[in-house]
């Protein structure tokens, strides 16, 4: 059994990595930045260590003696960030953390990237071979652009000798989404009656399966490889209908035209600028909705038996947790 450090252990994916490691009998050191979300680790037999990934304070102590490192706390660009500055910060933060990990010398680093780094391929499902190049050859959202840049930094570290495996989760649905990020879409349909939907395809996966996928990537993944972690492609209308039925609301009835959706997104961004908050519907999300993406996660299923919990079950588990936490 390995001793593992989980960076971002109180986050949505990190909390599931911690539980998957414990289920496999590993010793876990859970790194967190703020006491605010420590409730997600309550009752778990883990060693807790405070780590600030901006200053790297506490990181050396957290890494000490750990054979596996899971980096699930990558830089996330805020809505108000300038594009050039956000990309530069994503690259710089990744380099700083990778250098600290390199000096510690773990036997395996599993880096949490995103399925947004996989480009759309007309006529078929995209897989790991379809990863975006860097520099980019076309427009991508700020979030995707930063994730692509960071992923290529990790691949460069692998070429320089770091034992890295990259995982690319799709839309994660499940418990412990305390911020929430992925759960924002689910809550939009579950908490408020939204009678409209965008014409969009999304790939979804249960976050518990993503946590187990990280652990199996550490034990069975091939160094320098990407692994798309996903389960099922669903239209946004189908996803919204599943959520609506789960909470007893009528499903959405009308498709929102692209132009109207873009105008609504502009309005939510104006509100966000004034309130210094994240917009409910960013324009980059609406623009990305025009690019239909289907994902093929068969590599992870084939090479380390990634579990495939039905999306319906993932939605029920997520809603149950949100109810317990007072979101619903």
Image (tube, rainbow, N blue to C red):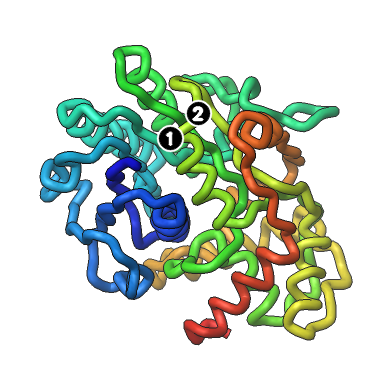
Quarter of the image that includes the N terminus: top left
Which quadrant of the structure image shows residue 252? bottom right
Q: Please say whether residue 142 is visible from this viewpoint.
A: no
Which quadrant of the structure image shows residue 267? bottom right
| Residue 196 coordinates in the image, percent (x, y) | 79, 69
Work out whether residue 288 or residue 210 is closer to the camera in this orientation and state it: 210
Work out whether residue 173 or residue 275 is closer to the camera in this orientation and state it: 173
**On the rendered structure, is 5 left or right of 321?**
left
- Residue farthest toward the right in the current orientation of the protein: 253
| Local SS, label 2 | loop
Q: Are marks 1 and 2 in contact (CB under 8 Å)?
A: yes
Task: Name the residue tied to disc 1.
Answer: 218
> Which mark, residue 93?
none
Q: Please say whether residue 167 is visible from this viewpoint.
A: yes
Residue at 48%, 66% (x, y): give it.
177
**On the rendered structure, is 286 left or right of 68?**
right
| Residue 137 coordinates in the image, percent (x, y) | 57, 20
Which quadrant of the structure image shows residue 248? bottom right
| Local SS, label 1 | helix
Residue at 35%, 23% (x, y): give it.
163
Residue at 12%, 50% (x, y): give it.
58
**Disc 1 versus disc 2: distance between alpha carbons?**
6 Å
**On the rendered structure, is 191 left or right of 196?**
left
| Residue 213 coordinates in the image, percent (x, y) | 54, 43
Residue at 29%, 38% (x, y): give it.
89
């Amino acid at each position: 059994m390995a001793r593992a450090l989980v960076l971002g252990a109180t986050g949505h994916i990190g909390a599931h990595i911690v539980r998957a490691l414990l289920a496999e009998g590993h010793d876990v050191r859970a790194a967190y930045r703020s006491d605010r979300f420590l409730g997600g680790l309550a009752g778990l037999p883990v060693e807790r260590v405070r780590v600030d990934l901006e200053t790297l304070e506490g990181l050396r102590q957290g890494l000490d003696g750990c054979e596996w490192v899971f980096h699930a706390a990558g830089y996330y660009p805020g809505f108000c960030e300038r594009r050039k500055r956000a990309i530069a910060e994503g690259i710089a933060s990744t380099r700083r953390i990778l250098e600290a990990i390199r000096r510690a010398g773990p036997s395996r680093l599993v880096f949490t990237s995103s399925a947004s780094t996989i480009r759309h391929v007309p006529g078929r499902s995209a897989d790991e071979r379809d990863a975006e190049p860097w520099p980019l050859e076309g427009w991508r959202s700020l979030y995707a652009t930063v994730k692509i840049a960071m992923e290529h930094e990790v691949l460069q570290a692998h070429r320089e000798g770091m034992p890295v495996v990259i995982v690319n989760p799709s839309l994660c649905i499940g418990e412990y989404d305390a911020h929430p990020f992925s759960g924002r879409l689910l809550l939009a349909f579950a908490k408020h009656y939204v009678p409209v939907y965008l014409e969009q395809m999304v790939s979804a996966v249960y976050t518990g399966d993503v946590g187990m996928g990280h652990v199996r990537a550490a034990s069975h993944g091939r160094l320098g490889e990407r692994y798309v972690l996903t389960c099922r492609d669903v239209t946004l209308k189908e996803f919204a209908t599943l959520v609506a039925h789960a909470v007893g609301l009528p499903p959405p009835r009308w498709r929102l035209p692209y132009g109207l959706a873009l105008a609504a997104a502009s309005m939510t961004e104006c509100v966000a600028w004034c309130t210094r908050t994240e917009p409910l519907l960013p324009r980059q999300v609406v623009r990305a909705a025009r690019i239909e993406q289907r994902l093929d996660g068969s590599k992870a299923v084939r090479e380390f038996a990634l579990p495939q919990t039905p999306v319906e079950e993932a939605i029920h588990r997520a809603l149950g947790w949100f109810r317990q936490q007072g979101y619903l």
